[in-house]
Amino acid sequence: MELLYDERIDGDIANVDKSALMAAVLAVAPQLTLLDREEDLRPFECDGLSAYRVLPMLVAMPTTLAEVEALMRVCYEHAVPVVTRGAGTGLSGGALPLEKGVLLVMSRFNKILSLDADARLARVQPGVRNLAISEAAAPFGLYYAPDPSSQIACSIGGNVAENAGGVHCLKYGLTVHNVLSVDIVTIEGERMTLGGESLDTPGFDLLALFMGSEGMLGVITEVTVRLLPKPEVAKVLMACFDDVELAGKAVGDIIAAGCIPGGLEMMDNLAIRAAEDFIHAGYPVEAQAILLCELDGVEADVRADCERVRDLLEAAGATQIQLARDDAERQLFWAGRKAAFPAVGRMSPDYYCIDGTIPRRELPRVLKGINDLSAHYGLRVANVFHAGDGNLHPLILFDANQSGELEATEALGGKILELCVEAGGTITGEHGVGREKLNQMCTQFAADEITLFHAVKSAFDERRLLNPGKNIPTLARCAEFGAMHVHHGELPHPELPRF
Ligand SMILES: Cc1cc2nc3c(=O)[nH]c(=O)nc-3n(C[C@H](O)[C@H](O)[C@H](O)COP(=O)(O)OP(=O)(O)OC[C@H]3O[C@@H](n4cnc5c(N)ncnc54)[C@H](O)[C@@H]3O)c2cc1C
């Protein structure tokens, strides 16, 4: 196997003279905030995956487009790598800094530039919080549909870079389905607009390519999002099960019956107890699993759908079904689900969130497999998932201070993802690959596919200065990891460029 490029980029970058770099940046962008003292850098040493920590050489916090362009030009000229950061809520180490790199923090790009209620779109800067878009659109009866559970904190730039999903993505789509265009600055410091207000644009769909590109192809400096009218009515049914696998089967039954809920989420007993203890959402703590099923639309349709779904849940073996009495109770049911990660965090010194997808029909089998793995490794696993999408979030509870527990947790997480791939799924549903899942990329993809990913990266960033060492593993790593290549045929394209 041949090394495509060295992931140990920190060791390979020629010794960068920090003072010279700062002087060069400030010469072209004198107002740009640069941080280089250890106490100022410390808050940026990790994202939501705090097991990995690196102090960046320098943090840059621009407020203008001209500053971003100037910074990129200087970094390009000096061959200094750049990692872009939004709000730092990512769970795969995507915004993990580099010891010899610049961390470009976009949080001061936090303005909603325009909101056109008639055209149902908003132009926003990338540091705008996800929830702030819906708050700004609410007076017009509109909202931005993708709603990651981190929506009070995460930025729309980070959402685009991760192609974020959320509770309501089953019906309304992921970020990719709700963004009309993005403006970017390339590593050479040039501006580009990808996509547009019309639904189709000529040429390759570079906008789609940017969705989930994890800061590897360019810096997102503006996003135009689609806004949707708020549904007339939304109702939530909570169904309780005394068997997790039965709840998993009920999910498939609902979709197979032709019903597309606004959201269809599942939590197992450990997650239910954690959330109930934290939020007091009214969850039944004795249930082995609950399903939250939201039905939205016009009143008559919602009423009919509620009846239909209630029948399906009963037939699937639900022991109790409760319709949220009013909007306050509906919000409370969702609050418990959206707080499930921090709630689980209160039960254990540490937890590790896994993010894999599987075909819905495989839910019962995979849940049993996770249970068996949890017993084998002796580590508790709380399951929370976007069940309708088949997007699993097993949360492994561990104590990093106990010798060997972190390693066992990583091994268990890897096994769960392999189980997902074997079941016909993927190693990430929405949290991205980042630094975390480089090995699992080797499981998912064959060498030719990984080579093709490098070729795409190279087309945008030939010198591999943007977020190097993330998202795409080297072939050498895959050889070392002993990749399984569970699916995908050979690509009819052996002659790829070399790097
Ligand atoms: C409690 C909790 C719950 C979560 N729930 C969900 C969920 O339901 N659904 C979901 O999808 N995710 C979820 N996440 C993960 C995370 O919130 C998302 O991945 C989110 O999209 C990250 O946004 P951010 O602004 O924090 O990005 P960051 O963490 O700062 O960065 C993430 C990646 O995006 C890149 N990036 C950021 N901004 C830019 C930019 N302007 N230009 C180019 N690249 C950029 C970074 O380089 C990095 O690779 C959750 C996280 C937590 C902590």
Image (cartoon, rainbow, N blue to C red):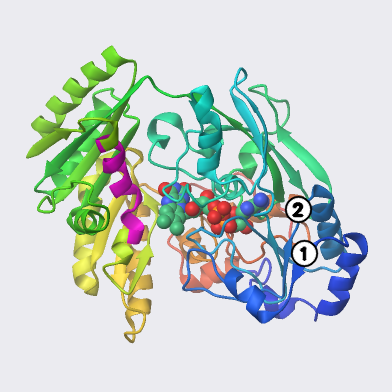
Q: Position of residue 324 (x, y in %)?
A: 21, 33
**Disc 1 residue type?**
Thr
Q: Are marks 2 and 1 in contact (CB under 8 Å)?
A: yes
- Identified at 55% across, 37% down, the residue is 133
Work out whether 81 lies above or below 157: below
Q: Nearer the viewer, residue 274 or 451?
A: 274
Write the start and end of the magenta stretch as one range: 329-342
Q: Nearer the viewer, residue 165 or 118?
A: 118
Residue 335 vs residue 7: left or right?
Answer: left
Residue 264, disc: none
**Residue 367 visible in this rendered orientation of the protein:** yes
**Disc 2 residue type?**
Thr
Q: Earlier in the sequence, mark 2 or mark 1?
A: 1
Residue at numbered disc 2: 63
Residue at numbered disc 1: 33
Residue 329 vs residue 117: left or right?
Answer: left
Q: Nearer the viewer, residue 165 or 126?
A: 126
Distance of label 2 from label 1 (alpha carbons): 9 Å
- Count all numbered tags in the image, as a single digit: 2
- Image-quadrant location for residue 61: bottom right
Q: Is residue 275 magenta?
A: no
Of all residues, the one furthest to the right in this rendering is 27
Query: What is the chief secondary structure element of the magenta stretch?
Result: helix
